[in-house]
Image: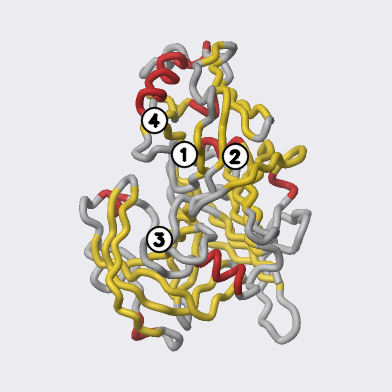
Amino acid sequence: MTISLRFIIAAGLILFLVSRYATGSQAMMRIPLKSTKTLWSKDDVTLTNVNDNTYFGQIMVGTPGQPFNVLFDTGSFDLWVPSLKWPKPGSKRYRSSASKTYKPNGKKAEIRYGTGSLKGFMSNDAVEIGGLRIKQQAFIEATEAPGRRIYERPWDGIFGLSGISKSTITGARPIWRTMMDEGVVTKKVFSIWLRRYSDSAEDGGEIVFGGIDQEHFTGAHTYVDAEGPLNKFMMYSFFVGKIDTKVCSKGCKVVVDSGSTYIRGPPNLIVKINKQIGVAADCSNYDKLSEVISFTIAAKTFTLIPRDYIERKNGKCKSVFADAVTDFWQLGTPFIRAFHTVWDYQTPGTVKVGFAKSK
């Protein structure tokens, strides 16, 4: 079964269209959407793009399903949605009493993100993503977000996409691992394709569970072996134009982080890169920028053009290269917009991350 959800942004109004393809006794509801060729059978969730700052899609929690818009985050482990105690006015809130499949847990949980922290307690319930249903998944019912930065986000919760067997934060099995272990996906692969907000498009991108959509990229993917809870790999040879910045000359540890709106690295190195880029805050030299930024992954050179690495909004320009609070680099959404990205878990004990030029 394939299900596609499309979010259409028009004049500030978000409309929801759903297309379902089912077989047998399952119900069928169909609204025409674009047809795509696939390499494998897949289930996908269309993403909403908010000014190139964040991308989110809808999941359902409980039975009957309660809808939540979540950030799909390859840089974290756990799933959380707001509880009835969540203080932000107007928020969607999970109601355990309204679900036939809810199972209590009660264990306290706390997560610290680079942009804020979260507190809550663990619960268990059914979760549906696109046409895929997980009978029982441990997740956090969030009660508060100290520092309040999370309250400013346009999504309801976060869907951690780590594939490790147990979260290092809560001890729960991450939802992507559940999907693989219980055979919810046909192939142990997921892929992310992101559009630019400025593109003339009805949707902001797509995350595909169990396959790859070949309409999202050109050429072949370059794969690199990754390791650890966040799938780290090595990056080398960082150039701005023809100038070698000497950044990563001996190799830098990197993760692809779909929850980050920037490409983040050590502050001393980011200063060097941004000085070399030299974009003016008022965009006065934007049209004259022609330098490409290139670096090497798995012996393949990946190149970003000014459109990829300069954020231009309301007459203001800035580089997407920002300071990291970790000891490794984070390739966030600016990189994923440029390069369709695949996480492949098909070989036991091995994770490969692949990149191909996005369409």
Q: If you read the primary sequence from the N terminus, does the residue marked by circle 3 or circle 2 appear first?
A: 3
User: Pointers 4 and 2 in contact (CB under 8 A)?
Assistant: no
Q: Considering only vertical position in the picture, is 219 above or below 55? A: above
According to the picture, the residue beneath numbered tag 2 turns out to be 200
**Label 3 vs label 2, nearer the camera:** 3
Task: Confirm whether residue 317 shows in the render.
Answer: no
Q: Is residue 216 left or right of residue 130?
A: right
According to the picture, the residue beneath numbered tag 3 turns out to be 168
Q: Considering only vertical position in the picture, is 211 above or below 102? A: above
x, y (%) of residue 205? 58, 49
According to the picture, the residue beneath numbered tag 1 turns out to be 330
SS state under label 2: loop
Q: Quadrant of residue 236?
A: top right
Q: CA distance from mark 4 to mark 3?
A: 24 Å
Relative to the observer, which residue lies in front, 49 or 72?
72
| Residue at 40% over, 25% down | 270
Specify few, some or many for label 3: CA neighbours under 10 Å numbering under 14, 14-19, or 20 or more.
some
According to the picture, the residue beneath numbered tag 4 turns out to be 266
Amino acid on which disc 2 is placed: Ser
| Residue at 51% over, 43% down | 255
Q: If you read the primary sequence from the N terminus, does the residue marked by circle 2 or circle 1 appear first?
A: 2
SS state under label 1: strand
SS state under label 4: loop
Amino acid on which disc 3 is placed: Thr
Q: Considering only vertical position in the picture, is 158 above or below 266? A: below
Q: CA distance from mark 3 to mark 2?
A: 41 Å
| Residue at 41% over, 18% down | 272
